Image: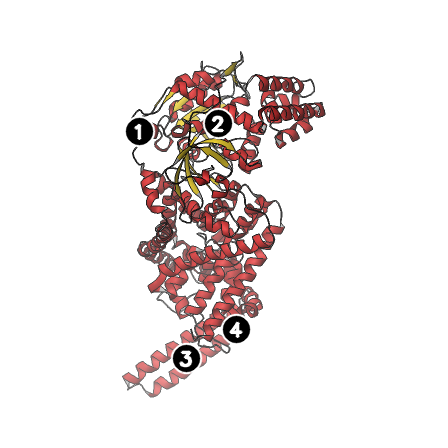
Amino acid sequence: MTLADLKNGEKSIITKVKGSGAFRKRIIEMGFVVGKEVAVIKNAPLKDPIEYNIMGYDVSLRRSEARLIEVSKKGNGNNHKEFEGTIETENTPAANGNRNSKIINVALVGNPNCGKTTLFNYASHSKEKTGNYGGVTVGAATAKFHHRGYTFVLTDLPGTYSITSYTPEELYVRSHIIEEVPDIILNVVDTSNLERNLYLTTQLIDMDLRVVIGLNMWDEFLAKGDRFDFESLGKMIGIPMVPIVASKGRGIGKLFNRIIDVYEGQDEVVRHIHINYGKYTEKQIKELQELIRKPGNEALTTVISPRYIAIKLLEQDKEEIKRVKEKCVNAEEILEKSRIESEKLSKLRNEPVETVITDAKYGFIEGALKETYKPATSKIQKLSQSRIIDSIVTSKILSYPIFLLAMWITFQATFYLGDYPMQWIQAGVDWLSETVKAILPEGIVRDALADGIIEGVGGVIIFLPNILILFFFITLMEASGYMARVAFIVDKLMHRVGLHGKSFIPMLMGFGCNVPAIMATRTIESKSDRLVTMLIIPFMSCSARYPVYILILSAFFQDDRGTILFGIYLFGILLAGLVAWILKKTMFKVNTIPFVMELPPYRVPPLKSVLKQTWFKGEQYLRKMGTTILVASIIIWVLGYFPRGEKIENQFNTKVEMVKKEFNNTVSTVKQDNKQLSSLTTGYHQQLDSLARELQLQKQEYSMIGRIGKFIEPAIAPLGFDWRMGVSLVAGSAAKEVVISTMSVLFAGNPTDESNQSLVQRLQTATYTSGDKKGEPVFTPLIAMSFMLFILIYFPCVAVIAAIKNESGKWKWPLFLAVYTTLMAWGVSFLVYQVGTLLGY
C-alpha cells in the first residue's frame, strides 16, 4: 500500500521510501522517514496534489510522488530507530573572528516561514518583505543595529529545510556560512514544529558553529497546551534557547543578550557535541577526518569542520567533493576513501548514505524530544482553525470561485476606495502647476517645471492611493497563508502546462513587482521550470502597469473599470499558461519535478505589520517618482521642447494676426447687434484655441521626440496608435509608469485653456489635427483596449531584463524575452483592433 491509496482522514505508518535523487532527499529531510505516522488531510479540488500531515505540520505531494512512499496501517507510529545519543567532546564550538571586537556578525538561519524575516525587521527596524508561505526571502538582506554597546550586523538568509545541495537557496545558505564566517548563527525555530525544524539544527551542530536558537511563535506553542523543557534540551545539545514572539517583539532583547553572552564566551550552556550516527558510521567518519586533517589542508580545515566534511563526503555531496579537490593536497586519497566507505555503508544498510544519516538525525531529535517535550494530554482533538478555513477555500466547488472573487474584490476596491484620494491629489497637482505658472515669468524654466516635472511626475503620483490599496490586499493574502493554498489548488492546472505549483507563487508576487518575483523562482528546484517561470512572469501585471490601466479605464470604461481590470489580469495569467505550455513542448522538453510544499497554518496578520509592508511599497513607489520618473519626465520634456520651431511659430503668429484683423473688421460692422457680436466673439476664441492646439501639435511633431514618434508610427498605425502613444510605449521600456508621465507631457492641455483639464479629460478629447484622420478622436474604447493589451504583454522594464540576466546567468534569455513579448504584444493588439474595426466597434 502507498500513500496515494489512502483516503481522506486515514492514518498510516511509513515503511519504505522509494525513488531516487533530489526528490527522495527532500521528502526524507522534510520528515517522510520510516516509522513516522502520516495522515491524509484532503485532496486538492482537481484530486491532485494531496495534503498530508506529518510531524505536526501540513505538506502537499502529488499523487505520483505519494505512490513512491509505502505505508502500513499497522503499528503505533513510533520510529524504529534507536536513540544513539551524543558523543561528548571537551571543546566548545570554534570562535570566529575577534572576540574583542564590538561588532557581532549574526546570520539568521531557519526553515521557510519560521519567522526569520519578521525577527530581522523587528530587531533592525528594516522593511524586508514577509509572508506566511515559504520562499519569501530569496537573497541575503543585511542591516545594522546597536544593543548593549555592540553593533550587530544581521544577515537574513533564505529559508531552507537543510543545507545540502538540493536547491539554490540551500547552496546559498551553506556558501554564506562557509565564506562569510559569521560570529554567531541565530537559528530561528518554529516551536510548533520542533521535530521538523530541529533537523536543520543538527546540520549546524555538525558544522561546529556557535549557535543560538530563537524559539519563535512561542505564544502559539503555549496556546496548544504543550510543555517543553527547552533549557534541558539546550544543555543536552550545547545550544542556548530563548523563547520569542518575533511578530510582537517579545523576547527579542533577551535573545540578543544571550547572543552577546555566547560571543563573549560567558554562556555556560555552550559546548560542542557530536551526534552519534552509530558505531560503524562513526568509525568511517573518524578515518576520513584523519585524512582531511593532514598538513597542507589548512585552507579547508580552518574554515570548515573536518567532521562535517567527512559526513558530506560519505553522502557524496558534489559541492564538498569539489571543495576538497580545490583545497586538499591529498584530495585523491580522501575522495577514493570516501567513495569506498560510502558504498560499504550503503550496502550494509541497504539504502543510500544520505538516508542513513538523515535517519540517524531524526532518531537523535526524537530521542531528545522524548526527554524534554510533552504534548498536551487532552484526547479531545478539535478541528483546527486552519482545517475549518481550508474546508471552504480549498474545497472542490468553492476554491476557484473564492480565488477569483478575492482578486475581483481587490480590483474593485482599488477604484471605489481610491477614487476620492485620487481626486484630492489631482487637485493638489493642478494647484501646484497653476501656482508655478502664476509666480514664474514665461520661459524655459516655467515650462520645464510646470509642463515637464509637475505634469510628468504629478500624472503618475495621483495613482498612489490605488497602489496602496492593491498592496494592502496582496499583503493580506500573503501574510494570512492564503497564497500557499492558491499554489495548492492550481498545481494540477500548472502541471498540465508543464510547470510546478510553486511557480504560481512567484507569478502572484509578480502582481506587486516582477523583479522580486523573478528572484523568487530560486525556490523552484528544476532549472528548466525556473527558466520557463522567469520567461512568463512579465505577463503578470505589476504595480508599474497598474496606473496605466487605471488611467485608460477611468477615461474610457468608467462603468466597468473593476471588471475589465480583473479581466486583464486574468488574461495575463491565461497567456502565461499558454506560453509556458508552448515553451515546455518546444524549448524545454524536460519532465517537471515533484511537487513538495509546506502548507503553513492560517494566521491573523497583525494590522500594524500589514500596514507597514503596504506603506513600504508606497515608499518605493514614491522613491521612483523622485528618481526614474523625474528623470524620464525631464528627458521627455526636453525632447519635446527642442528644437523650438521658430519658423512654425512665426507662421502661427501670422495666422493669428490674420484672424484678429478679420475679427476686428467684422466687429466694426455689427457693433449695434449684441447677439451677433457675441456669436462672432465665441467663434473668434474657438479659432484661436484651434490654432493654439495646432501650433502645439506641430511643434511636438517638429521636435526630436516627434521625429522619433513619426519614425515608428508606420509600425504601430495598424494597431490604432498615433505617434504619441508609440513614444510613450518606447519610454515605458525604462519603467511602465513612464508611459503616464510621457503621455502627460505629450497630451498637454491647450496653453490658452485655463480649465486645467486632467489627463483623463485630455485623452478623452484628443483628436487628430491633420491628415486623413483630421478631427477623429485619437482614443476610442477599441483603441484603448488595444493599448492596454500592448502594455500588458510587451517588453518588460529594464530592471526585469537585468534580473533575468542575473538569475539565468546568460543574456540570451532576457533578449529572447524582450523580442518575443514585443512581437506577441503587436500581434494581439493588431488582432483586437483590426477585428474590432471590422465588427464596427
Residue 443 visible at all: no
The residue that disc 1 covers is 223
- Residue 9: x %, y % from top left: 36, 38
* Helix, strand or loop at mark 2: helix
**Left or right: residue 675 compared with residue 572:** left
- Residue 706: x %, y % from top left: 54, 67
Q: Nearer the viewer, mark 1 or mark 3?
A: 1
Name the mark on residue 298: none
Q: Nearer the viewer, mark 4 or mark 3?
A: 4
In the image, residue 286 sits, relative to residue 637, either above or below, namely: above
Specify the amino acid type for callout 2. Tyr
Q: Are marks 1 and 4 in contact (CB under 8 Å)?
A: no
The residue that disc 2 covers is 199
Q: Which of marks 4 and 3 is nearer the N terminus?
A: 4
Specify the amino acid type for callout 1. Ala
The residue that disc 3 covers is 660
The residue that disc 4 covers is 648
Q: Which of marks 1 and 3 is nearer the N terminus?
A: 1
Q: Nearer the viewer, mark 2 or mark 3?
A: 2
State how far apart marks 2 and 1 are (Cα).
24 Å
Q: Nearer the viewer, mark 1 or mark 4?
A: 1
